[in-house]
Image (spheres, rainbow, N blue to C red):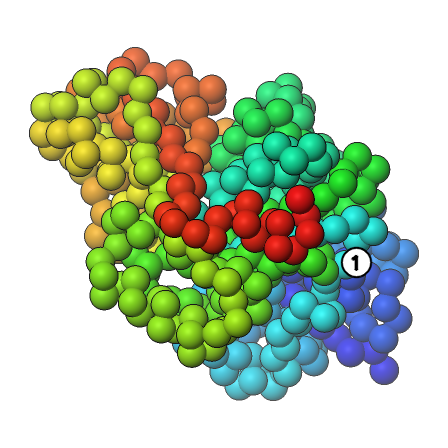
Amino acid sequence: MKKRVLIMGAAGRDFHNFNVVYRNNPDYDVVAFTATQIPGIDDKKYPVALAGKLYPSGIPIYPESDLDKLIAELNVDEVVFAYSDQPHVNVMHKASQVLADGADFTLLGPKSTEIKSSKPVISICAVRTGSGKSQTSRAVVRALHAAGKKVVSIRHPMPYGDLAAQACERFATYADLDKYKCTIEEREEYEPHIDMGAVIYAGVDYEMIVREAEKEADVIIWDGGNNDFSFYVPDLKITVADPLRAGNELTYYPGETNFRQADVIVINKVDSATPAQLSEVRENMYKVNPKAIMIEAASPVFVQHPDMIRGKRVLVIEDGPTLTHGEMTYGAGYVAAMKYGAAEIVDPHPYAVGSIKATFEKYTQKMSILPAMGYSDEQIEDLRQTIEATPCDVVVMGTPIDLLRVLKLSKPSVRVTYELQEIGSPTIVDVLKKFGFI
C-alpha cells in the first residue's frame, strides 16, 4: 500500500521536498499540500507539468487551517512539515496536532533533500529572517568576482504566480524581473545581484535550476531564504546570526540546524547589539558549534540625501518578511531615521487599507513601521494607498530595492541601503582562501 502523504508548506521548501523525495517515488501518494505565511497561494494546484507522471491531475493546495479536516477526509498517513522561521514550540504544536489526528509527523533533513552539484557550492543561510544574509551573500559574490571567478547565485524559492512557468528563472537584467512578473519580495532578493552585474536563478524545480547554473558558473552560491537550510550539498556552510534576537539561534526551526552545522558563523549587527546580546550568541556558538569560524560584522546604513530626514515627520517602510514572520519591529529604515534626526516616526496603522490592514491584524508585535508587502498587484496597490494616506513629510524606504520602480508616489522619499562590514579578522576573504575558493 502506498503511504498517503500531506506536505505542509509555504510555496518553497514544500515543493522542493516533493520534487526530490516524492515526485517519481511509487511508494508514496502525495494527496495534498497546505499553505501558510504567503497570501494567495492556497486553493491552487501544484501543476501537472511539475508533479510528474504519477500525478496526472496535479496536486491540490489547501489552506493550512483545513489541516485536521484534510487528514481525516484524505486518509493521510504522514504529514511532512516543510516551511521555516518557526519557533520550536510552534513546530511541536503542529506535530501534536498531526499526531492527535492519527498521522505521523516528519521533518526531512539535508541528507534527504540536498542535491549534489558538479560545481563548488557555498551555502549562505541564517538563523532568522532579517539577520543579514543577503548582504553577506553580496559580500561573498564580490570577493569571488574580485578573484576572477564566474559566480552564479541560486535563491530560495518564491514562486507565487504560475508555478509551471516559474520552474526555472534566470535574472540578469531588470527586464527579467518584468518578464517573470516579480513581486516586491522577489525583487528585494534579485535586484541587488543584478546591480552587481551578477546572475541569480530561482524557481520551483531546483534540479533543473542547478544544471542550468552549472553551465555558466565556476562557483555556485546558495542564497538561502527565510532561515531554511541549503537545497544543495555545500562545500562551505556560512550561517548569519542576529544578536538583536539573541537566543533565537537555539530556539527556531530550522535556524538552529544552520547554526549547528555551519563552518562559519557571521555575527552581524555588532554595531547595534548590546554587549550582553553579543555575549549570548558567542556563548551559544561555543556550546553547540565550537569548531565554527566566527566573523563579526556590522551593517552600516547609507542614505543619499540624509538632510531630507532631519526634523521631519517620516513614514518608515521596511522589508516585509522581516517585520512579519521575522518578528522584528524595525530595520535599516528606522535606524537611518533615528541616525539622521527624524522629528517623528508616523504610525501607519490608522491609515492601512485592505491587505495591509489585514497584515497588521495578523502580526501584532508592536511596530510603528510599514512592512513592504507586495505579493500581488492588489497588495502593491494597498501598499501605495496606505503610504499616500499616512500624513508624513518624507517616506524613508529601508527595503533592499528601490520601491519607486513598482510604486508611483506623490510624497518625497529617500532610500536606505546597507552592506556587510567585517570587524577585525577573520574576514570573508580570509575564509574563502582557507577553503580554497580563491
Residue 253 percent location from the top left of the image: 49, 68
Residue furthest to the top: 410
Residue 267 appears in view = yes
Quarter holding the N terminus is bottom right
Q: Residue at x 44, y 34 (%)?
A: 400
The amino acid type found where label 1 is placed reads Lys
Residue 182 appears in view = no
Residue 153 percent location from the top left of the image: 65, 41
Q: Quadrant of residue 355?
A: top left
- Total tally of numbered discs in the picture: 1
Q: Residue at x 31, y 20 (%)?
A: 304
Residue placed most toward the observer, 306 or 4? 306
Residue 267 lies left or right of residue 428; in this view the side is left
Q: Circle 1 is placed at which residue position?
A: 116
Q: Quadrant of residue 93?
A: bottom left
SS at badge 1? loop
Residue placed most toward the observer, 357 or 415? 415
Residue 61 percent location from the top left of the image: 64, 56
Q: Residues within 10 Å of mark 1 (few under 14, many from 20)?
A: some
Residue 295 percent location from the top left of the image: 44, 55
Quarter holding the C terminus is top right
Residue 420 lies left or right of residue 314; in this view the side is right
Q: Residue at x 39, y 16 (%)?
A: 408
Q: Quadrant of residue 56?
A: bottom right
Residue placed most toward the observer, 325 or 100? 325
Q: Residue at x 72, y 44 (%)?
A: 219
Q: Does 380 sit above or below residue 281?
A: above
